[in-house]
């Protein structure tokens, strides 16, 4: 009788583990599908944002191309300079012109 109950208990445990594995597999699949859908939506939103940013840049550049060139040159200087950088520039350097005259007026 004890052996019979042990066999029945093992059978129920086995069936329960099998059912649990089915549930986990279904949840894993659903999770993967939701993540894929969310990633696709994120890519779409990011692309739309980048397109909008590019349009804003284009409009700003068209509005004042000289100021845009000025900002880009400042970005370039900032990229290679830090607080320990020593730079020797000729008198006609664009950077020195900016420091002497200030940014171009709009």
Image: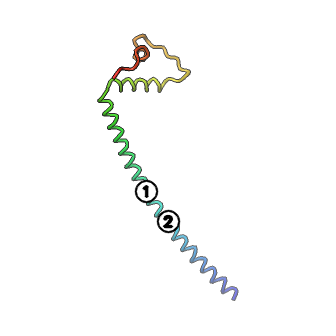
Tell me the quadrant of the picture where the N terminus can be found: bottom right
Residue that appears at 30% across and 33% down: 59
28 or 11, nearer to the observer: 28
Could you say which is closer to the camera, residue 94 or residue 26?
94
Q: Which residue is drawn at 34% across and 34% down?
A: 57
Residue 94, percent from left and from top: 39, 17
Tell me the SS state at disc 1: helix
Measuring from the top left, give residue 67's x and y in whole percent. 35, 24
Mark 2 sits on what residue?
27
| Colouring rule applied to residues | rainbow
Question: Which residue corresponds to the image point at 53% horizontal and 67% vertical from the top-left?
Answer: 24
- In the rendered view, does 13 fall on the left or right side of 64? right
First in sequence: mark 2 or mark 1? Answer: 2
Point out residue 32 in the picture as x, y percentages from the top left corner.
46, 60
99 relative to 20, above or below = above
Q: Name the residue that disc number 1 marks.
A: 36
Q: In which quarter of the image is residue 91?
A: top left
Q: In whole angstroms, how far apart are the C-alphas of marks 2 and 1?
A: 14 Å
- Count residues near mark 1 (Cα–Cα under 10 Å), then give few for <14, some for 14-19, many for 20+: few
> What is the quadrant of the C terminus in the image?
top left
Residue 37, percent across and down? 41, 57
Q: Indicate whether 76 appears above or below 100.
A: below
Up the image or down, 69 lies above or below 26; here it is above
């Amino acid at each position: 009788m004890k052996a019979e109950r042990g066999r029945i208990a093992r059978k129920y445990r086995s069936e329960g583990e099998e059912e649990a594995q089915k549930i986990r597999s279904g949840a894993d699949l659903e999770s993967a599908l939701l993540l894929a859908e969310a990633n696709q939506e994120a890519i779409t939103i990011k692309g739309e944002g980048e397109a909008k940013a590019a349009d804003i840049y284009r409009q700003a550049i068209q509005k004042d191309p000289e100021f845009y060139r000025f900002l880009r040159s400042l970005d370039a200087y900032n990229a290679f300079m830090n607080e320990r950088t020593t730079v020797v520039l000729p008198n006609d350097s664009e950077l020195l012109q900016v420091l002497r005259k200030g940014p171009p007026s709009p």
